Amino acid sequence: MKLLGLGLAASIALATGAHAATPVAKRVATVDVVYGAKLPDPYRWMEGPNNAVFAAWLKAQGTEGRKRLNASPSLATWQQKLTAASRASVTNRLQHRIGGRIFFMRLEDGKQGVLMVRGTDGSEKALFDPNTVAGAHASITNYGVSPDGKTIAVNVDRGGNEITTIEFYDVDSGRKLSDELPDVWGEFVVAWAGNDGVFYTQMAPDDGHSDRMLNMRTLYHKLDTPVTKDLTVIPAGGTSAFTLDPQEFPFVATDPSSPYAMVVAAGARSEARICVATTADLLQPGAQIQCPVAYDDAVQAGSLVGKTLYLQSVKNAPNGQVLALALDTPVLKLSDAKVLVAEDREAVVTNFVPARDALYVKRMRLGLDSFVRIPYTGNREFISPPYDGQAALIDASTNADGLMFTLQGWTRPRALYAYDPARRALTDLRLGASSLRDYTSLVDSETTEARSQDGTMVPVTILKPKGYRPNGRTKAIVFAYGAYGATVTQPAFDVMSLEWVANGNIYVLAGIRGGGEKGDAWRLAGKGSNKARGVEDIVAAADLLRLKGYSDKKRIVLYSASAGGIIVGNAVDRFPDHFGAAIIHAGMLNPTRLAADSNGANQYAEFGDPNVPPGFRDLRAMDAYLNLKPGPAYPAVMLDVGLNDSRVAPWNSGKYGAQLKYYTKGKSLVLFRTDADSGHFGTSLSQAAAESADHYAFVDLVTGQAPVKRHKRSKRH
């Protein structure tokens, strides 16, 4: 029976019917008592790696979810629209300029990104195409180029779990070298030590049951030598001069201008510990390492230039400052650092990069980016981008003058610009992104604020059809994240969300507390014991749509992913009558069990340590799975799970969904979407199109509406 044309109540009834067709999760009486608190956990059996019983249950849920989505009248339409949009767009990303050449990743035709290089004469060639790898779902997660630009180290993921092997290629010939470095997390790029060796961070061995995100180590590999001969620079647990907790990731960072190397301990947190040694000393036993930066110093980034260490810090400066610490002294103390860029009450320092001529500092004001150029000698100058937008990527090299950065707006595709300090001029390098569809004529953006429960004003961006007039019934997706200081309200060109809006709908981005919209103070205001404020903030953004007459609560859908699962999961728990549905992708939903989660211990600094009372209390308060209860009329929920996820274990979604199904007894739709070819996120435009089509079809299904054609502008406007 077609849903098209049915009333809202009838549509939802049909969408949620036949609940008995899905396998019911068994409940096993399990109760923990932690610091006096009882924690019933009937789905504990879902936990653990290589859990065949849970895998079979989740696969069955995904099969049933696929049947429901395939029955949605709008799915085929969304698939056609989004696939066409993805194939009509070309995205170049991860651009780096070395020796006059630009290295980059190109995504087009819905395929995996191809590693490319543009020569000084403008010619382009492919260096590595994962789409040609036989017998594997391959993708590139990162890469690093040698200082002379002749060799490139590529992180290659086969299987979607983000655990990569680093392969080396000769840039001029494209020839693959014999060197391969296994078991490297996909984000971890090599640090070059000259042009013939690299430092790299390796995951713990795979023994089938241990958390491989713990006890990492850093090694040195010399090209054209056996990997078995690699030197362990920082072992698991660290050294006497550089101790490591199991959850800390050790890195070495280098720069061709400097004889020094940074030795860094970091993880899923905003701050890092930074130590320093000479590169030569690191390659010898008993390296002399000095550690001037501790976590309490709130340093969020660092770079080397010659004998100076530059640092971005938010200690006593929540909007950020840049410090300069001289390294040619016997004892390194952060208190000796000079303030190079003082805190600005109106603008937030978000990043910086060193070039040969200057330090380039990126600042954000009201969500828009600009730069300050600080020469190593001479007067600083301000650089304004050619239009208002977000400069998501910034790149520079101490071997060359100038800055390279991307710039994008809500309806303007990403462009790549180069700043030439000699001419004080910007050049469009024509190596950003493109789209055959002009969204400037289809989509408007509105910057506003929502008043949260405690009166705090929350930044909100609303994307709506061009010429939109409120009608009180427009479907709306509200996205928020609220963790690690990530900012979501800066302009970003995203074809998938633009297609949603171009077809008559609304897309909202809420800069809730826990993010970085208003500097580090805003992050802390939604962290740990303050996590509930972020939940209230996203609900305030949803309520704003009703107050403005844009929509009603049944047509509003909350959406988030990963750590944002805490936000949306608890919004479902606490405010089920403020919106009609929720979509949670790879969500963190049972954080009291972080110790049992893959990558869990790495998250303690951001969310709380379950092994100490204050941390446990914070985690218990934000645990969406434990906060569910019988009785409320919960909204429909889609749980989107990548079966190869190494960041947030799929049992988070499994436990939350099973509990929600148990409490609602089939009265609310709980739909699992599973993807056997992806991990935490998909990596190709075709995967993004398929996922977004399913999300939008789900929204249509639970709101009882087919896709709305784009709103035509009134002739009076």
Image: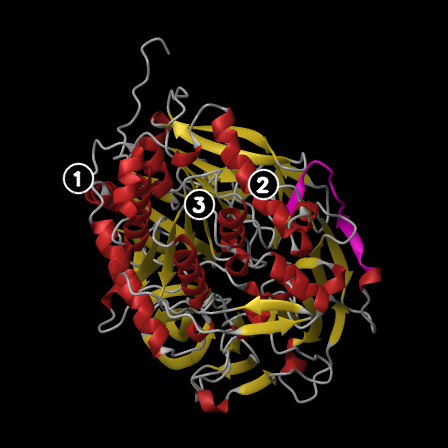
Q: Amino acid at mark 1?
A: Lys
| Three-letter residue code for mark 3 | Ala
**Residue holding disc 1:** 2
**What is the x, y in percent for residue 179?**
40, 81
Vertical relation: 711 (above or below) 677: above
Q: Earlier in the sequence, mark 2 or mark 3?
A: 2
Q: Nearer the viewer, residue 406 or 25?
A: 25
At a point 61% along the width and 68% down the height, the residue shown is: 38
Does the stretch in magenta take in 670? no
Locate residue 698, reporting x and y percent. Answer: 31, 45
Q: Quadrant of the N terminus?
A: top left
Task: Estimate the spatial distance between the alpha carbons at disc 1 and disc 2, rounded to whole Å.
Answer: 37 Å
What type is the residue that disc 2 sits on? Asp
Which is more toward the observer, 534 or 629? 629
Q: Nearer the viewer, residue 405 or 517?
A: 517
The residue tagged 3 is: 633
Secondary structure of the residue carrying tag 3 is loop
Q: CA distance from mark 3 to mark 1?
A: 25 Å
Residue 189 position within the rendered picture, expressed as x and y whole percent measured from the top left: 49, 68
Is 505 on the left-hand or right-hand side of 387? left
Name the front one of labels 2 and 3.
Answer: 3
Per the rendered image, the range of residues in magenta is: 336-349
| Neighbour tally class for label 3: few under 14, some 14-19, many 20 plus, Cα within 10 Å | some
Residue positioned 73% across, 81% down in the render: 241
Q: Which label is found at residue 537?
A: 2
Q: Describe residue 83's horizontal placement relative to residue 561 as left or right.
A: left
